[in-house]
Amino acid sequence: MLPAFTGMAAEITTGKDKIILKFADHAGKYTIKRATGRFSEFTTIGHTTKPVFIDKKAKGSPYSYYYIVLDERGDTIASMSAETELFGENVHIYSPTDSPEAIAADIDAIHKEMFRAEMGSGRYALLFKPGDYTSAGLLNIGFYTHLAGLGEVPYDVKLSNIHTPPHLNNNNGTCTFWRSLENISVIGEESYEHDRMFNWAVSQAAPFRRIYSQRTVRNQWKNGWVSGGFTADCIFDAPVGSDGQQQWYTRNSFLNKGRGKFAENAYNFVFTGVELGPEAAKETYVDTDWNKGGNVTFEPTTPVISEKPFLFLGKDGRYKVFKPAIRRDCKGVSYTKTDMGEGEVLDLLDSFLVASPATGAAEMNRALKAGRHLFLTPGIYLLDEPLTVSVPNTVVMGLGWATIVPPDGAEYAIKLDDVDGVRLASILFDAHHSSRTLLKAGEKNSVKHHRTSIYPCIIQDITLP
């Protein structure tokens, strides 16, 4: 049995083979409608004259359903879903039964809000359940927005195309920060035409992970300036690169055609654990002498790594976090078309405290001390006391650019005690107040070597404003 959750002007509880809806009493007759997605077709499932309705025909996970309640005039007096209650209103979860036009309009509205919000307070996660969404068309991603698939592997979610248009003039992408992409496929033809390319034209603080792309990927907006980025665990069938990026780090990925026609002749391009396909110009992916104008560092393997933990929807309909295994002296991606790879699956409700900005730091610290993992939903967390991670192998991860602000005058915002196996991922630290340290890991003069241990501590996608 899942715990109770509430929705807008409503309350839902779940039991065996039933979902109970409770809502404010407006007197009269109510119509209950249900859908399998936020933008799916709602159909009438019943009527009631009381402010309560029991849905006995709901099968499987309650995360499969969205409800609205109408009064006698046909006005919506309540809307509710388990997903919104769990993750908050700034996590938009799309279903393959949703209208593609509605999905496109929703993401476009978020992009318009976040396009110039370089120092804004909005935080969003756009999550896609397994399915084909290519008919939703091109999706633009702005500041503080995380777009991800909820499948086990990237192939489970298909999108048509993604762009990150810069908000600065003259196609300048040097301030295109704080957005992320994970666990999706981009389906389309290979092309060097701007509108048909997958343009991830960013400049740092914009991680690009676990992606499969059929489209040509360009890390630059037309011929504008851009200043660096990061790619990991990706498969590119078509060329990937740029003509003007200053620097880029690509790790444990497959480049079928290498950089193709892109020049990549600027400052510094680093590749570790990267596999090259038969059409890649392998002679251009070798170490070059920086003193003689070279700009490539190529290491055939990555000494030790684990990919970043990520959220997915299990086959049982429950939300889970996948914690990828440690890999050593490895090359290539961590998954196959049908297998998510080695690692540990953690049930979100069973293993994590799912926090929101309204959750107090004391409650988060109690959960961490008790051995629970911590999952931070989108928003800005104004801590009134620092967070401390003291249990080995704890996962602390954010979603949708969750942002931590330390208490005024605090020594740190988050401290990782001198223990093995901690995973800290996807958190934006905002100094804001005066604090000596944002993140403290381990103790000074410690003789423990967490990097070389069986269970090293790994910090990923931790960024600053």
Image (cartoon, grey):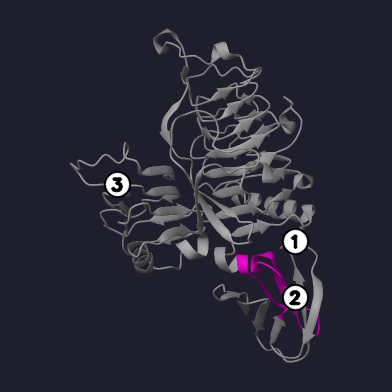
The three-letter code of the residue at mark 3 reads Ala
Is 103 placed above or below 140 here? below
Instruction: Say which residue label 3 marks.
Output: 441
Tell me the residue at 39%/68% (across/down).
Answer: 360
Instruction: Say which residue label 2 marks.
Output: 57
> Residue 283 location in percent, x, y?
56, 11
Q: Which mark is residue 161?
A: none
Crowding near the residue tagged with mark 2, few <14, some 14–19, many ≥20 C-alpha atoms within 10 Å: few
Crowding near the residue tagged with mark 1, few <14, some 14–19, many ≥20 C-alpha atoms within 10 Å: many
Is 359 placed above or below 272 here? below
> Residue 194 location in percent, x, y?
71, 29
Q: Is residue 303 left or right of residue 145?
A: left
Q: Which residues are magenta?
A: 55-83
Most extreme residue toward the left is 445
- Numbered disc in front, either 3 or 2: 2
The three-letter code of the residue at mark 2 reads Lys
Give the CA distance from mark 3 to mark 1: 43 Å
Give the CA distance from mark 3 to mark 2: 50 Å
> Residue 50 location in percent, x, y?
71, 90
For the residue pair 277 and 435, the one nearer the viewer reads as: 277
Tell me the residue at 71%/70% (across/down).
Answer: 59
Give the CA distance from mark 2 to mark 1: 21 Å
The C terminus, quarter of image: top left
> Residue 254 location in percent, x, y?
59, 28
